Image (tube, helix red, strand yellow):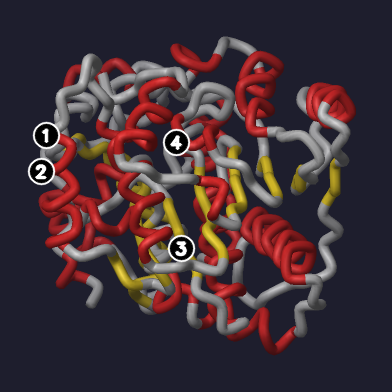
């Protein structure tokens, strides 16, 4: 119900509030995995360059206001409440979605704050996503894999076409890697729009981050260099990465919260992201790999993901959001595995049961959904 494809509602809301997106210097980022990371890294780089930077991402984990930040500072509760009241007072002939309202609030906030640059992450797709009313100075697509197939299409090519909808006239498209199922689609659309594709060259690296994250980092660097017309120094990059949480609020993508044993929090929620997270943890651990895994009811996992999960000390976990898989759902998943794994009713139960088994050289990965991570008590990793 939160997803209402099309731009007309968003355009009408912008008109009601007299907001002109053309006044914002925006970068628009789509993709299946990595778009939130790319947005946050880019925003952190711009913040380190002493720019005033608006950042719009989704979903949030603990607080709605996480979605709308300027140089890391969340929008105020007062501003959110006032805007919601204003929307409620409008005599609309349509019902805007949660995401449409949130996006328009972000535009208003960034205009009010006189941001130098604004970085926007798409919601689900691209072509019909509320954010696609933007007139960006650069666009980027991180990668294409199967996710949200009920909305975006059953094949990689269909999904690529939806994501490619953010391509704009005379506006460069940055991509991380040249994927065979999507590149020809991107190439055709950029030519049609008198634009060009810029493929990232992986010039930079930061210590102790996964390979896929390094690709996101280099994508962000290349966009930064294009829009600022300044080369990025190694020192600037290191500072942007070290200060990313302060600059953007970025967290929970392979966030390390303990060393002995290693404990990682991660919000990967589709096959490609989950596989990358598990492979990274397998490389890092000197002992056993434990996984606490939660998932949304609509998520299906391929055989490769299930095989890799089966090789870990795995626990399934429910979360409090109504979209959680049920005990019966996980029992169905169990049928594809050779081992019988425990199913816990909450993340706290799962942690309490798993902790005693962890030795100093072991690694615990908590992953599968934003909703699972949002059930943690924040004090757990403060």
Secondary structure under badge 2?
Answer: helix
Q: Position of residue 283 (x, y in %)?
A: 60, 61
Q: Nearer the viewer, residue 93 or 136?
A: 93
Q: Residue at x 25, y 57 (%)?
A: 65
Q: Residue at x 40, y 54 (%)?
A: 266
Q: Of the residues tagged 1 and 4, which is closer to the observer?
A: 1
Q: CA distance from mark 2 to mark 3?
A: 23 Å
Secondary structure under badge 4?
Answer: loop
Residue holding disc 1: 88
Residue 54: assigned label:
3
Q: Position of residue 123 (x, y in %)?
A: 44, 36
| Disc nearer the start of the sequence (1/3) | 3
Q: Of the residues tagged 3 and 4, which is closer to the observer?
A: 3
| Disc nearer the start of the sequence (1/4) | 1
Q: Nearer the viewer, residue 147 or 25?
A: 25
Q: Of the residues tagged 1 and 3, which is closer to the observer?
A: 1
| Disc nearer the start of the sequence (2/3) | 3
Find out whether the residues at labels 1 and 3 contact each other: C-beta distance under 8 Å.
no
């Amino acid at each position: 119900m939160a997803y209402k494809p099309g731009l007309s509602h968003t355009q009408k809301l912008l008109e009601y509030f007299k907001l002109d997106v053309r006044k914002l210097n925006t970068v628009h980022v789509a993709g299946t995995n990595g778009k939130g990371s790319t947005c946050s890294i880019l925003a952190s780089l711009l913040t380190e360059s002493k720019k005033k930077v608006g950042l719009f991402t989704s979903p949030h984990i603990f607080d709605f206001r996480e979605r709308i930040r300027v140089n890391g500072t969340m929008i105020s509760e007062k501003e959110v409440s006032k805007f919601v009241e204003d929307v409620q007072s409008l005599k609309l002939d349509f019902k805007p979605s949660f995401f449409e309202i949130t996006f328009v609030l972000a535009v208003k906030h960034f205009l009010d704050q006189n941001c130098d640059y604004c970085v926007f992450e798409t919601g689900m797709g691209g072509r019909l996503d509320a954010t696609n009313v933007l007139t960006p100075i650069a666009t980027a697509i991180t990668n294409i894999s199967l996710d949200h197939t009920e909305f975006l299409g059953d094949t990689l090519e269909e999904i690529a076409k939806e994501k490619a909808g953010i391509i704009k006239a005379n506006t460069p498209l940055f991509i991380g890697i040249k994927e065979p199922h999507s590149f020809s689609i991107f190439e055709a659309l950029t030519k049609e729009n008198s634009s060009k594709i810029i493929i990232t060259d992986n010039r930079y690296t930061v210590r102790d981050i996964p390979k896929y994250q390094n690709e996101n980092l280099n994508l962000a660097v290349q966009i930064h260099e294009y829009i600022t017309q300044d080369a990025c120094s190694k020192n600037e990059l290191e500072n942007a990465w070290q200060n990313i949480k302060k600059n953007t609020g970025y967290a929970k993508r392979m966030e390390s919260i303990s060393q002995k044993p290693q404990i990682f929090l991660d919000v990967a929620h589709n096959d490609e992201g989950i596989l990358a997270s598990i492979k990274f943890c397998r490389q890092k651990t000197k002992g056993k790999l434990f996984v606490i895994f939660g998932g949304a009811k609509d998520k299906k996992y391929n055989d490769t993901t299930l095989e890799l999960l089966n090789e870990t000390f795995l626990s399934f976990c429910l979360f409090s959001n109504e979209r959680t898989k049920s005990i019966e759902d996980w029992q169905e998943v169990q049928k594809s595995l050779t081992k019988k794994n425990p199913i816990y009713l909450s993340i706290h139960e799962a942690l309490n049961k798993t902790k005693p088994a962890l030795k100093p050289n072991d690694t615990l990965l908590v992953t599968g959904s934003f909703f699972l991570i949002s059930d943690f008590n924040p004090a757990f990793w403060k």
